[in-house]
Amino acid sequence: MRVTFATQPVSLDRPNEDFVAATPDAVVLLDGAGTPAGSESGCSHGVAWYSRMLGSTLLASMTQSTGTLAEILAEGIKAVTSMHDFACDLAHAGSPSATVVMLRRTGDMLQWLVLADSVLILDVADSAEPMVVCDDREAQVGSRYRSRMDALPGGSPEHLKAHREYVEAMRQHRNRDGGFWVASVDPLVAGQAETGALRADQVRAAALLSDGASRLVDRFGLATWRQAVDLLEADGPAELIRRVRQAERSDPDGCHWPRGKTFDDATAVYVTVSEDAE
């Protein structure tokens, strides 16, 4: 596989809570769930630490283990949970968490796993439209709680307060039946991930997007998934993120595109997987 990626934090004075890493045969992308100012997490390490520890653990196992991606994710969550020191309250509803996308080539097969709302796009041969894999359960739950937040000007004190209340309400549905599922402290959530496999020669390319990058399509509506893949192929991941930032800056108050975060960490990965790319 040939992999290119770009990642950009909201600002240089705070850590990027996304994580991306790759080998010639594996890619992993995580998007850490940030803790709004004024909310507690019960953890002394923080979200960026969690994303980096879990992401690096997963990538190492993906290249060494013959287990399924779900098995690798479960073991990775278990391993990182053991890294928390005794000062961390792992029962806290705000314990650090992250979305996960894993992509691995093994022989002539391409395997994937998606947990929560980061996006995997597979540009499948002989199909005009790409295959899009995303777990939308968080969005379904969130639709019950976001109306007040979305009605307020982004960045205002009232919006910041409503966003914190929204996050805290969502925590009550995290990793519970009828709610949504993310990587955190319980390895059993790996069983809730979307998984699949295709022959590698059936896939021209793949894209992995954190929700800060996928918002170009799924929140702003400024491109289709097909156009996003074509943009990544022609101009690369950094250009996709540039267009996201351009859209965010054009609507700082969220009047046109209501959203919890005016700006978000953004990560985009483009992977060429077809046989003729090797």
Image (cartoon, grey):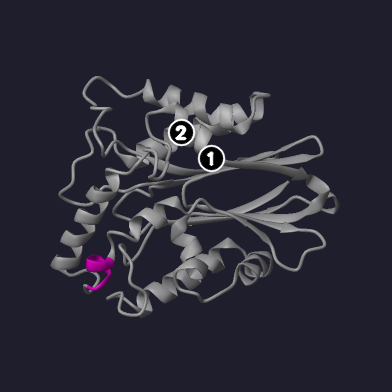
Please determine whether, in this image, residue 28 is positioned above or below residue 158: above
- Position of 63 with respect to 158 (left or right) is right
- The residue located at (38%, 34%) in the rendering is 184
Element marked by disc 1: loop
- Residue at the disc numbered 2: 189
Type of amino acid at the residue the image marks with label 1? Ala
Left or right, 48 with reference to 169: right
Circle 1 residue: 193
Q: Position of residue 277 (x, y in %)?
A: 81, 52
| Residue farthest front in this picture | 178
- Tell me which amino acid carries mark 2: Val
Q: Magenta span covers which residues?
A: 147-151
| Residue at the (38%, 25%) spot, across then down | 81
Secondary element under disc 2, as helix, strand or loop, is helix
Q: Position of residue 152 (x, y in %)?
A: 21, 72
Q: Residue furthest right?
A: 276
